[in-house]
Image (spheres, coloured by chain):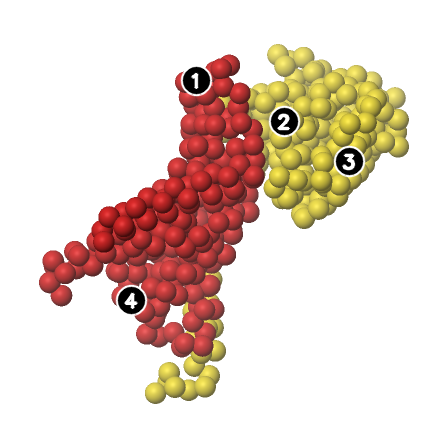
Chain colours: A red, B yellow
Amino acid sequence: MSPGMAGSQAKNIAVQGLWKDNPIFRQVLGICSTLAVTNLVMNTIVMCAALVFTVSLSSATVSVFRTLTPRNVRMMVETLIIGFYVIIVDVLLGAYWPSMRANLGPYVGLILTNCIVMGRCEAYGATQPPGKAFLDGLCTSLGYTFILLIIAAFREILGLGTFLGMPVPFFSGPGWDKWIIMVTPPGAFFMLAIVVWFFRWLQQKQEEKAK
Amino acid sequence: MMRERKWYPIFYMFVVTAAFSSIVIGFSALTQERVEANTQLAFEAAVLEAGLGHHDPARSGPEVHRKFVEQVSDPNASSGGAYILRQDGRFIGYALPFEGQGFWARVKGIIGVEPDKRTVTGIAFYEQSETPGLGAEIVRPKFREQFKGRVLGPKEKPIRMRRPGSSLGESDVYAVTGATQTTVRVEEMMNRAIRDWQTQVEAAGTSEGGPKPTGGAS
């Protein structure tokens, strides 16, 4: 394979994960964590970092074992591998950042059930070589990350008047009546719907232009 | 070839599971010491918070530990199982641990009481896995701040948790809406600990006259 071809392939994988097949606004996967942890930007960053770690490494690991794994037990093996990385994240947080682990509560463990992880392992890791599987996992989870950060930034600023815990001018002042609903679960639904709508509209416009 | 044998998937599953599990077990054994230190630190922070009646989020781990060593001494015979808090050598209150089964798992907390043995200085939890958004609301300041200044009531039920909106007596607080199980269990475990403690300090108090101002200070 020539380097030019590898480069265009990598670019293609990145475009798919970040934009064309974005897990949030295109595939609408992994929504429970999207709704649960996005009321503070800091929690979102840590959650997304954990997901990026889990998705890219488990997809690559599934890929390493792809020729050895019998078809009929492959999903068990995938779950095992995903669980392995999730436990590592959980143990690391418990040892080095217990307050963050308490903030995220059960959601770290629930990365295991995030459809994006299994989805990438099944759709990509199970058939493609490890390097490509890693890149695909990385780009897909970064696609998830940037949408979640947008949602989280709006929720924290509108709902609490802060960004990463620091007061934001105007929104933290007396002139802004804090929208508490934004940091409660219903606020997540509103924000998610608006973000999905906006990005789909953007995508559609782009596609029409390309024609 | 081995891969075509019927037993291969089972064998494969065993090997893969054993391999990954050993790594995870080894990994968590490596970090165990830190995890235990963190648990101890959470406990110390809860004792300080409940006993001093205010939360200081900016304080780092080592500071919490230093303050704990400085201000808190272990339970002695006269304190009835409660930790003893001091400020500048002066006895300022008790920090009584309580624990019991919550809705999902064990709940562990501390209730702080003034030297009069009746006025509550605050409560804090250092271990719980209640439902986020419902039972887990017990750890929020909104719920916990209600306890500050409450007076322990009659022996059967020193603290009562009431339905939100009802009128409160001097030893009542509002329960968490939507978390009846957590509330009932926390109320029960808290009251059980308070009752036992009261019985013990009363017994000790008649013979010794309360904790000695210097005893147990480290």
Say the numbered circle drawn on residue A128. Answer: 4
Chain letter of mark 2 equals B
Q: How far apart are marks 3 and 2 (CA)?
A: 17 Å
Circles 2 and 4 in contact, beta carbons < 8 Å: no
Residue at the disc numbered 2: B141
Secondary element at tag 4: loop
Q: Distance between the residues labelled 1 and 3?
A: 42 Å
Q: Is residue A41 above or below residue B15?
A: above
- Density class for disc 3 (Cα within 10 Å; few <14, some 14-19, many ≥20) is some
Chain letter of mark 1 equals A
Which residue is pictured at 20% across the width and 59% down the height?
A9
Circles 1 and 3 in contact, beta carbons < 8 Å: no
Chain letter of mark 3 equals B
Residue B102 position, x and y percent, is: 71, 44
Is circle 1 on the same chain as circle 3?
A: no
Q: Nearer the viewer, mark 1 or mark 2?
A: 1
Say the numbered circle drawn on residue A120. Answer: none
Residue at the disc numbered 1: A170
Q: Nearer the viewer, mark 3 or mark 2?
A: 2
Q: Which of marks 3 and 4 is in front?
A: 4
Chain letter of mark 4 equals A
Task: Name which residue type carries label 3.
Answer: Glu
Residue B43 position, x and y percent, is: 61, 33
Q: How far apart are marks 1 and 2 (CA)?
A: 26 Å
Asked whether the viewer can see residue A35, the reply is yes
Is circle 4 on the same chain as circle 1?
A: yes
Task: Name which residue type carries label 1.
Answer: Phe
Is circle 2 on the same chain as circle 4?
A: no
Asked whether the viewer can see residue A85, the reply is no
Which residue is pictured at 45% across the width and 27% down the height?
A157
Q: How many labels does the image show?
A: 4
